Amino acid sequence: MKKIIVVGNGMVGYKFCEKFVAQDTSKDFEITVFGEEPRPAYDRVHLSEYFENQNAEALEMAPRSWYKANGIELITSERVSDINRASKTIKTAKDREFSYDYLIMATGSSPFVPPIKGVEKEGVFVYRTIEDLEGMLAYAAKLNKEKPNARAAVLGGGLLGLEAGKAVLDMGLEPHIVEFAPKLMPRQLDSRSSQVLKLKLESIGLNIHLSKATNQILGDGKITGMEFGEDDRLDVDMLIVSAGIRPRDELAKACGLEVGVRGGIVVDNTMKTSDKNIYAIGEIALYNHMIYGLVAPGYDMAEVAVKQILGETNVVMPADIDMSTKLKLIGVDVASFGEPFMPADKGHSIIFENKTQYLYKRINVSHDGKKLLGGILVGDASDYSMLHQIYLNGMKIPEDPAQLILPAADGNAAFGDVMDLPDEAQVCSCESVTKGQICEAIESGEANDLASVVSCTKAGTGCGGCKPMVKDLTDATLKSLGIEVKDSICEHFDLNRQELYDIIQVKGYRTFNEVIDNHGKGCGCELCKPLIASLMATIHADTANKEYAIQDSNDRFLANIQRNGTYSVVPRVPGGEITPDKLIALGEIAKKYDLYTKITGGVRVDLFGATLNQLPLIWKDLISHGFESGHAYGKSLRTVKTCVGSTWCRYGMDESVSFGIELENRYRGIRAPHKIKGGVSGCIRECAEARGKDFGLIAVEGGWNLYVGGNGGATPRHAELLAEQIDNETVIKYLDRYLMFYMRTAKPLQRTAAWQERLEGGMEYLKEVIIDDKLGIATDLEKEMQTLVNRFECEWTQAINNPEMMKRFSHFVNSKEEDDNLVFVPIREQKMPEPWN
């Protein structure tokens, strides 16, 4: 029996073992794996998740029992110290000797620590292993006790550096990212996308310092700061070095294997080194003069080495390796694929940028406009999977390529359907899983849901960037077979929104922890947390102040964050009717806090430029003059726009202002899957533009015509007629039923128009439910809405009356001072944020 020794038990070393034992002929070999770390291989790509749960087992690629069950000897905490190529033996640091027929070098890399004076000081860490993270957690806990306002810096603004920045934030320290280059993620992003990402990260609390060359680490024994140049320093109490990697090729050099000038073991396309019995895979392998720092090429290398050893010599590494990547950094989508920095002589770039929403999308297309060559996505990478597939498979792109990154007017994607992909399209590049393999797993009966597809194909188990497409393919294939598809919220809940709604209502849960402890798993994510916050509000009328930590950022601070980090404040003005005294009060308050003022399209006054510290003070002044929160930040009722109606207008047929005020006061504060707007027009001239609202009323002979499902935004829709010539009481009855039915059944962030379009039976079905009470739920819907109406509380008032809630409205933990970095410039006798460069 031949012997294989694998040196290195990281992700790629483990993958070699997994792929090897899956082969029928593997039983003719003995495998021994050496790992320096004390534990089996773990998922280093998702290492930062350890900060959330400190559960090392959750990161394991496989438990020790897996190695044993597959006849693999796993030896941990033992370093291989010497390779004797002549005798084909290795020796360990414990002076044990083992022989091999094939040696697999999978030693990976080690963090690069720049030769900076003082880098050896106490409080300086690298970001590579679970033990590194445990050291950071212990040191941070000590700092938090000794110095509540401690700061920590991360040296390096690449992928791992930004992950480390999130870790610093989670450890309760003030985070600073220090990057030598003039942009973040220099290998993946261009300057403009880096600037958008920088703004987004700064908005959530990270301090970014670019173009900073660190001269020395300051401190007497332990770190107290970083010096960049004369009179340029940053005081910090801890430093995490994440400045790149270096291949661990010291064993290779010692035994005479060929290595590159800058390190790494030279391999050919079969993964063989300069010794035919030794293979190198992963971050130690220098292939095509390059070290590939992504897991997907490492897995491909493992596959090639397995096939070569087993005699399938036609399996080799491709000449070109896809370096596309997608990840979520601190809740921010970032992706790049193909050629992100394509030179101008090779094609055209199409760029969409919206800094107010921290969005940047760039695609590069060939000169003839027929081929997608690459791109960058920041802030919204939901289209990454399809764009990546179009690029990989050379698929046809629209005549106007801009449609690939701009919202389509008809709401349909420009990509077509996921089932249009060719069977050979590689959906999961980490595990080399094609569309055809996923569909085959379902069609053959081997898999019948997303979890079983992942289990039997391994798709989505690497970096996870392909998970949305794997889910789409699974759903589409199941539907094509006539199998019902369950629409789960996220990986933490095997439930859809409706099921969660019912569970929370029946069980009476009032906290996120109650729900996830009893019906979910893990710690939750940016999808399920705000959703459950919304459901709590819909069912119990809980305001955003309760469990504010699971809210979206605007809900968390009860105001809309704007592009320079300040906030806008919008008091409610029901129906747009306002007294002179209230108008004067708004003006005086705006003047007092030097706020930019604007009358919105929704009959309200928007006050811009408030700092976080000022928000409670402004609310207090507004409340003293009879105002309350206008919920401009929430997925809730915004406004009910009115014309002047029969009160003043000579054409008015009904009192639109009074009814608009009544409706706005009735539905204020209710939370829904998306924001809701209403309109009431006093006649068919439609001055309130009611048919562009989620619900709209137009006065006609004999009463009101009620329209529903109108939306503005990127995909505008005209509302559809639900009922004609009905009185005020019937309008309220139907609206109670309509809004409650929408709130109970729509998907997260689904507007009323999209929800109506997807109702089976469309408008006729909606009329049967709302007017004819086909489902027998009309009374329940009315009662639920009345309960919410009765429980209304102004969130601003609630916040300023609770000292504990007030703690979140401060820039600094130890000071009530405002952020003095804000810069405004004049505009038409008011002020505006200084434009970006």
Image (tube, rainbow, N blue to C red):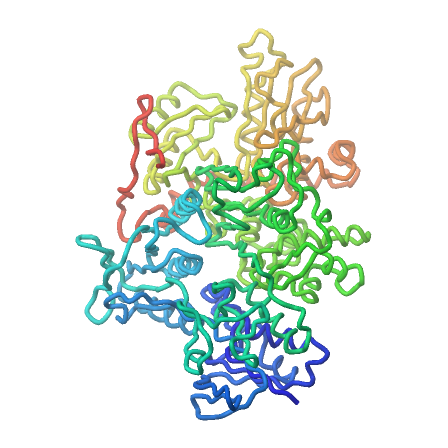
In the rendered image, which quarter is residue 405 located in? Answer: top right
Q: Which residue is pictured at 28% across the width and 67% down the height?
A: 115
Q: Is residue 540 visible?
A: no
Give residue 121's position: percent from left, percent from top. Answer: 26, 70
| Quadrant housing the N terminus | bottom right
Say how many tags the image has. 0
* Furthest-top residue in this view: 650
Q: Nearer the viewer, residue 141 or 836?
A: 836
Q: Which residue is pictured at 60% across the width and 36% down the height?
A: 368
* Furthest-bottom residue in this view: 96
On screen, residue 612 versus residue 467, left or right, reads left
| Quadrant housing the C terminus | top left
Q: Which residue is pictured at 27% across the width and 53% down the height?
A: 814
Q: In the rendered image of this protein, does residue 354 appear above or below residue 390?
A: above
On screen, residue 364 versus residue 721, left or right, reads left
Give residue 532's position: percent from left, percent from top. Answer: 57, 51
Give residue 323's position: percent from left, percent from top. Answer: 53, 56
Give residue 26's position: percent from left, percent from top. Answer: 68, 81
Q: Nearer the viewer, residue 741 or 42?
A: 42
